[in-house]
Image (cartoon, rainbow, N blue to C red):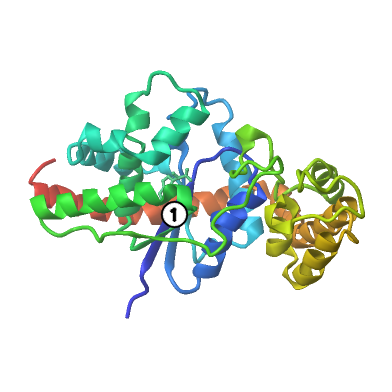
Amino acid sequence: MAKKRILSGMRPTGKLHIGHYVGALENWVNLQDDYQSYHLIADYHVLTTDLNTDDIYQNTIEMLIDWLAAGLNPEKSPMFRQSKIKEHAELNLIFGMLISVNRLERNPTLKDQVRDLHIENIIYGHLGYPVLQAADILIYKGNYVPVGEDQVPHIEISREIARRFNNQYGEVFPEPEPLLTNFARLSGLDGNAKMSKSLGNTILLSDDPETVKAKMKKAVTDPNKVRKGDPGNPDICLVFSYHKKFNPEEVPEIDEGCRSGELGCVDCKMRCSDKISAFLSPIIEKRKYFEEHIPEVLDILHLGEMRAKEIASATMAEVREKMKIG
Ligand code: TRP
């Protein structure tokens, strides 16, 4: 049987952080053997919250390098820019007719963004963010979409649009399903539930050991554990949540040491930093290779764009035929 297809993407906001890895990228790498995987750099989507395009290209390259360094294999997983495949824009326009403004206004991810970024007047393109995302997914007939949990409402909208199209014009699109990691979210160093560049609470995949240590020193812990000897509660400690991900073997011992007070926060943080850096070390190594071989990175992108274009144009031909237009 043919492998099912995965489509996922990220907005190019520059170098990625460990939250991107834990929430999505790790999953992409693990799934690429079992699915046909397509990975999109959502550069048009950047415009929904930032009209300044000066950094988009550089951010695209940085993100692509992180994808490659984390283990995405370009032969198995074509990687491409959304803006290079014009069919996305065409399908976006058509999909814009298949969903109400009301439905889009109810999107919780949009509401969160409006609150976090203090947006007063939502632009039309921002309201339509999930419509473009539906085009991204459905133009490749993606069956599964491995993303972080904040994206689940968008996948639901994609399903609704697919259903609406199929009912109106005939069966073209599968109804895509999200694929979540079992560790769907990593909190930021400041304790915020979200690790994000705009909140300045990240550890980057490219951070060297000294940087990781310096950042970890500032990480929040149980506020009741002021000095070594004080008993702490790991269940509410951010650093403990990182241990769970990056240092699972030592979790029972750390749990005990924290509760008894024997393990101080400074030691605990340094142990965590070492584990995170050990995890990052091969990624940083591979990153260095790609930084020194930019033409190879660009070739990977161009090849990915050719492969994506082929599928997108075939789907659009089918769409136009079903709709008896253009
Ligand atoms: N909205 C996604 C994010 O912010 C990025 C994205 C755009 C995407 N198009 C997509 C993700 C299609 C999955 C599938 O992370």
Q: Quadrant of the N terminus?
A: bottom left
Regarding residue 139, the answer to whether it shows in the image is no
Q: Residue at x 33, y 55 (%)?
A: 310
Q: Is residue 204 left or right of residue 253?
A: left
Q: Quadrant of the C terminus?
A: top left
Regarding residue 90, the answer to whether it shows in the image is yes
Give the residue number, with chain letter if any, for mark 1: 8
Count of residue discs:
1
Judging depth in this view, the residue of 323 and 124 nearest the camera is 124
Q: Residue at x 52, y 63 (%)?
A: 181
Q: Residue furthest bottom?
A: 1
Q: Position of residue 47 (x, y in %)?
A: 45, 29
Q: Position of residue 174 (x, y in %)?
A: 25, 61
Q: Amino acid at mark 1?
A: Ser
Judge whether 86 appears above or below 69 on screen: above
Judge whether 200 appears above or below 280 on screen: above
**Ligand 1 within 8 angstroms of badge 1 C-beta:** yes
Q: Position of residue 302 (x, y in %)?
A: 49, 49
Judging depth in this view, the residue of 319 and 241 nearest the camera is 241
Q: Residues within 10 Å of mark 1 (few under 14, many from 20)?
A: many
Judged from the image, the secondary structure of the residue bearing numbered disc 1 is: strand
Q: Residue at x 20, y 36 (%)?
A: 100
Judging depth in this view, the residue of 263 and 187 nearest the camera is 263
Q: Residue at x 63, y 41 (%)?
A: 192
Q: Is residue 97 left or right of residue 45?
A: left
